[in-house]
């Protein structure tokens, strides 16, 4: 492949990736926070946003590797039956690398913020689980009453029903 052909491939992917970032942002994040999906799922799983993003990236890379190793792939953006072609999967993986860089950059340069919709849930959760640090080790203990657990679950359900948490 000569340099001109390679440059054409790079341009094709960059143009498509730019469009995908716009389309998928509307699907997974608000205008206020491009990393909202990772933060929300981090709060749900107890992971850091960059860890959630790394898992999503790994899923895409695993899919690409499987298709290439099997030799069973459609070298297109979209298959005839409407599924993602291998080009789309590669573009998504490249975009996840950018999103991972953004997650890491934010976690290293900004104080983490609890999403607004989680503030009340976070307060209730703190009454259910206490964290004690001793000699550099964290110990978790369950506490709280059945009423506190019910309150936590009701607040979580209300938040989900209102659509404030994107899964």
Image (cartoon, helix red, strand yellow):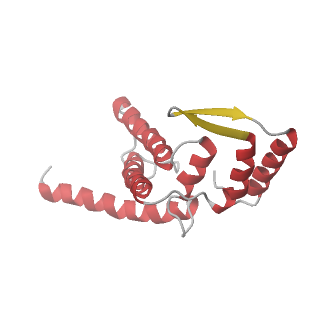
Where does the image place residue 105, in percent across and percent down from the top left? Answer: 39, 56
Q: Is residue 72 visible?
A: no
**Extreme residue toward the right, this view:** 147
Where does the image place residue 13, in percent across and percent down from the top left? Answer: 32, 57
Where does the image place residue 64, in percent across and percent down from the top left? Answer: 39, 39
Where does the image place residue 55, in percent across and percent down from the top left? Answer: 47, 40
Question: Which residue is nearer to you in this view: 74 or 164?
Answer: 164
**15 versus 2 height, above or below:** below
Question: Is residue 16 left or right of 82 when viewed as pictured?
Answer: left
Question: Which residue is nearer to you in this view: 111 or 20?
Answer: 111
Question: At 79% from the left edge and 46% from the top edge, which residue is drawn?
Answer: 153
Question: Is residue 23 left or right of 146 when viewed as pictured?
Answer: left
**Extreme residue toward the left, this view:** 2
Question: Is residue 98 left or right of 122 when viewed as pictured?
Answer: left
Question: At 54% from the left edge and 69% from the top edge, which residue is drawn?
Answer: 32
Question: Which residue is nearer to you in this view: 143 or 13?
Answer: 143
Question: At 52% from the left edge and 51% from the top edge, which residue is drawn?
Answer: 82
Q: Is residue 69 visible?
A: yes
């Amino acid at each position: 492949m000569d340099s001109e052909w390679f440059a054409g491939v790079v341009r094709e992917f960059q143009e498509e990736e730019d469009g995908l970032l716009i389309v998928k942002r509307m699907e997974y994040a608000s205008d206020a926070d491009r990393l909202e999906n990772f933060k929300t799922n981090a709060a749900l799983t107890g992971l850091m946003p960059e860890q959630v993003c790394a898992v999503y990236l790994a899923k895409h890379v695993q899919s690409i590797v499987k298709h290439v190793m099997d030799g069973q792939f459609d070298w297109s953006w979209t298959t005839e039956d409407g599924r993602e072609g291998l080009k789309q999967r590669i573009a998504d993986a490249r975009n996840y690398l950018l999103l991972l860089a953004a997650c890491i950059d934010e976690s290293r340069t900004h104080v983490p913020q609890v999403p607004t919709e989680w503030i009340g849930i976070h307060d209730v959760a703190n009454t259910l689980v206490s964290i004690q640090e001793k000699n550099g080790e964290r110990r978790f203990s369950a506490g709280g009453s059945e009423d506190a657990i019910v309150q936590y679950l009701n607040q979580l359900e209300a938040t989900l029903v209102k659509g404030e948490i994107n899964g």
